[in-house]
Image: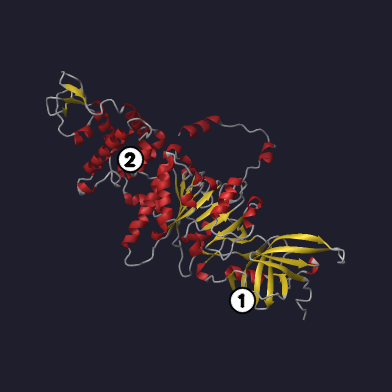
Amino acid sequence: MTDPNKNINAEVIAVFPNKVKLSVDDLSKFISADEQLEKLKVGSYLEIADDDNHKLIAIIESYAIVVDEKKASGRSYVIDANPLGIIEGNNFTRGGDALTIPPTKVLPAKQSDIKAIFCSGLKDKERFCFSKLAQNIKIDTPVNGNRFFNKHFAIVGSTGSGKSHTVAKILQNAINAKNSGYDGLNNSHIVLFDIHGEYKSAFPNANHVDSTNINIPYWLFDSDELGDLFIESNEDNSHNQVSQFRFAVTGNKKKFNPNLPQDKIYFDSPLKFDIDEVIRYIKNINNELINKKNNRCPTTKANEIIANRIPKYFESDLEFEKTSADFVNGPYSGDFERFILRLETIRNNPRLKFLFDNRNEIELESILKQFLGYTDERKANVTVFDLSGIPFEVLSITVSLISRILFEYGYYYKRLLTGNAACETPLLLVYEEAHKYVPKSDLVKYRASKTAIERIAKEGRKYGITLGIVSQRPAEISETIFSQCNNFIAMRLTNPDDQNYVKRLLPDSLGNLTDTLPALKTGEALLIGDSIVMPSIVKVDECKEYCPSSNDINYVEIWKEKWKDVVFNKIVEEWKK
């Protein structure tokens, strides 16, 4: 039998708390008995042993060539390696301070040992895999699926780094994972906010929702969302606008819900109201005249005395005109001219028809079913919200409403469960290009979505709702949201601000692994966090059948083709929709 140790010509020459320095006389002889292992390179694994059952696993960080005329080759090699942990039997433990001095042998790590690292302590029912080791694609890098999905995760990387394919692969693997013994859908529930409309091709059987079929009634908006939609906060009398708008909406909700306890109806209660009647109220209070000699009650041109503005001001546009010196302006007379114009402009905007048309015919139950893929037509594990057709001015509050409703769904579902029963339908919310609606900004237009998603980041896990944050500009994302993520898939990042931001937020640092961020290939990533036994550079598996429509355009190849005419009238028609 061949002695696997006969070619050993490496030795440990220095040990530091976070580094091991090795000297190798001849790299051609520095080989493993494992013939399948690829040639050594930066990122390759080594085993440093003091006996066959006790090995330190280290990863090569760098190497240097030392000129040595005494050697036959005229040179030797010095390798710097980062210690990862100890393998005893088939168990891997992080940390590298348990070796005796000096170690007896140094070899490239065997595949069986590397596989043992990633499978150590991982039960089959917890195993979830979507990538392989970048240095050796024969080795899977599974994660603990419970920890990966339960504690929020983030996928970051510059454009073209492979983020969309990574998102698609992770979610496809999640919806295809099953226990044996049943057919049909598994119990995964995923909501994907698709800002560019690129995931329809990746999930052809998903529940696809866009601006043409989305059910988002304006009456479901909370106070922040209604304020963002209708109130201009920088106007001088915005406080009066807010007070009267809140008063009118609350009064209108009471009118439309007479069977509910009236003292339990508030401005942001998820109850129906009629925005046209609210606008009518604002118009009337802006035009009203008061009769000084009649208890200062509003009085119309027809001399009709209005004892109660509600519900009278909801019913019609009243005419007010001074008929004597006894008539004076009401408390808000003329103050709301611009406010009324803005209310009517928003109400009649054809691009916002999905908020206002036939909204009072929709029930909350049907909204939840559409959001979660429980429609009567079919069930679906994934709901893709195509936000590409949503006007930018309402993008934030649209995302805010959907996020908030889903959080409250989880909250009230939890309340229905008895005792300490676990959540029956855990929900994952994936935000593509998250910096678009939860940026590190104090602007009012982002307030609603930031509030909703930050609440999920801080409290969602208790109710079975977790986040997947995807962005090419992590430095622009709300720190509250990003800092709650316990698992990261960091792909190629070329912007120094983004690189530094990710390095600062990563929960686990290992040597100079993060320095590889600008040099990663497409599809490669630094996988790090609570779900994986140790941080690793991985190659994300490719989508085999269904891919997102985010491939690069072959400019030069297309430009070489014959001139193509553009059908401008069709483009303009689509533009005007």
Residue with the most extreme bottom position: 1
Q: Position of residue 17 (x, y in %)?
A: 63, 66
Circle 1 Cα neighbour tier, 10 Å, few/some/many (<14 / 14–19 / ≥20):
some
Q: Amino acid at mark 2?
A: Asn
Residue 467: give x, y in percent of width and height.
46, 54
Q: Which residue extends farthest top?
A: 324
In which quarter of the view is residue 100 placed? bottom right
In percent of the image, x 34 and y 59: which residue is there?
A: 413
The amino acid marked with disc number 1 is Glu
Q: Quadrant of the N terminus?
A: bottom right
Question: What SS does tag 2 mark?
Answer: loop
**Residue annotated with mark 1:** 88
Q: CA distance from mark 2 to mark 1?
A: 67 Å
Q: Which mark is residue 107?
A: none
Is residue 547 visible to us here? no
Placement of 446 over or under 419, stated as above or below: above
Quarter of the image that includes the C terminus: top left
The residue drawn where x is 31% and y is 66% is 418
Residue 106 x/y as whole percent: 72, 71
Q: Earlier in the sequence, mark 2 or mark 1?
A: 1
522 to 188, vertically: above or below: above
Other residues around mark 2 within 10 Å, as few (<14) / some (14–19) / many (≥20): few
The residue to which callout 2 is attached is 358
